Image (spheres, rainbow, N blue to C red):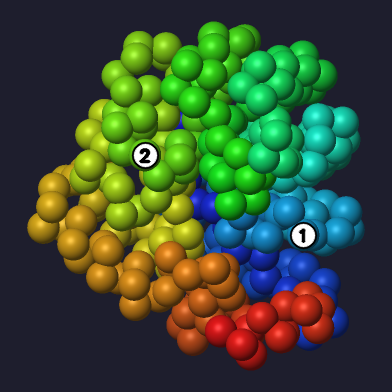
Amino acid sequence: MIAGTVVPLITPYDEHGRVSEKSTASLIEYLHADVSALMPVLSSGEGWRLTDQQWSDMVAFTVAHSHGLPVIAGVQAPDTPGVLRRAHMAEALGADMVAATTPFGARVGQDEMVAHYRTLQGGTRLPVVVYNEEPVSRNRASLVTLLRICGLPGIAAVKESSGNPEMTRALAASGTGVPVLQGWEDQVASTPGVDGLIGPLANPEPGLCNTLLADPGEPLQRIVDAVCDLFGLFRDDWYLRVKRELARRGVIEDACAPSGEHAREEDES
């Protein structure tokens, strides 16, 4: 069962735009004692924009340096065949699970979402974590749809990033037996009953995430919110800001960007 603090790893690059194995290993060494699982190449790892080589390298390096923690490979691709392709890559690389969004597009219907996860769980031997979000996929599942998906075999957990505390609470209280993990650090206190947290704050501050899960009251929530605001975790370029903080602490070598596009984003932030 997935529970506690799961870290959605940032993807560290070297000056040539390649994934840095040295920085990946250093990051995992920094946080492994305080987290329950490693989740590379999801949103905080820029999974939707990585090349196959970058994506494969990050998954492989995470598996190699995992300290025995489960590795949940993120998969963000526009359609079901694309998700399945990377799920098969994750299998070959030694990942323990995959975490996947719905297909991309505002017109993707709720029945299509159920069919997507049914195809995915039937097409890979790996357990599937459902990632319910909107910024990348441009859609999100309803509560009824999530309950239907949780009834499928092979569904390991839901990363619930809808931003709707009422829906998250209802899903957590539904009794499906599928763990529900909050995807927003600022909503832990408002969603009692969740099984854990998957948020970018776990990269620099996994211990603080554990403390919030153990005591999800408003006083500590306000502290966590202030730390998230300090690090810029609710801004569009949050992953770059996390990298800067980790580089400042000496955890990774540098907050390098993989391309000129990323460098421009960093300069404009």
Confirm or deny contact between disc 1 and disc 2 (CB under 8 A).
Answer: no
The residue singled out by tag 1 in the image is 49
Could you tell me residue 154's position as x and y percent? Answer: 63, 16
Which element type, helix, strand or loop, lies under badge 1? Answer: loop
Q: Residue at x 54, y 42 (%)?
A: 133
Could you tell me residue 145's position as x and y percent? Answer: 53, 19
Q: Residue at x 31, y 54 (%)?
A: 186
The residue singled out by tag 2 in the image is 164
Could you tell me residue 1's position as x and y percent? Answer: 46, 24
Quadrant in the picture for residue 162: top left
Residue 171: tell me if it is visible: yes
Residue 127: tell me if it is visible: no
Q: Is residue 202 above or below residue 15?
A: above
Which residue is at the far bottom?
A: 267
Q: Nearer the viewer, mark 1 or mark 2?
A: 2
Quadrant in the picture for residue 24: bottom right
Which element type, helix, strand or loop, lies under badge 2? Answer: loop
Q: Amino acid at mark 1?
A: Arg
Alpha carbons under labels 1 and 2: distance apart = 26 Å
Q: Is residue 257 left or right of residue 251?
A: right
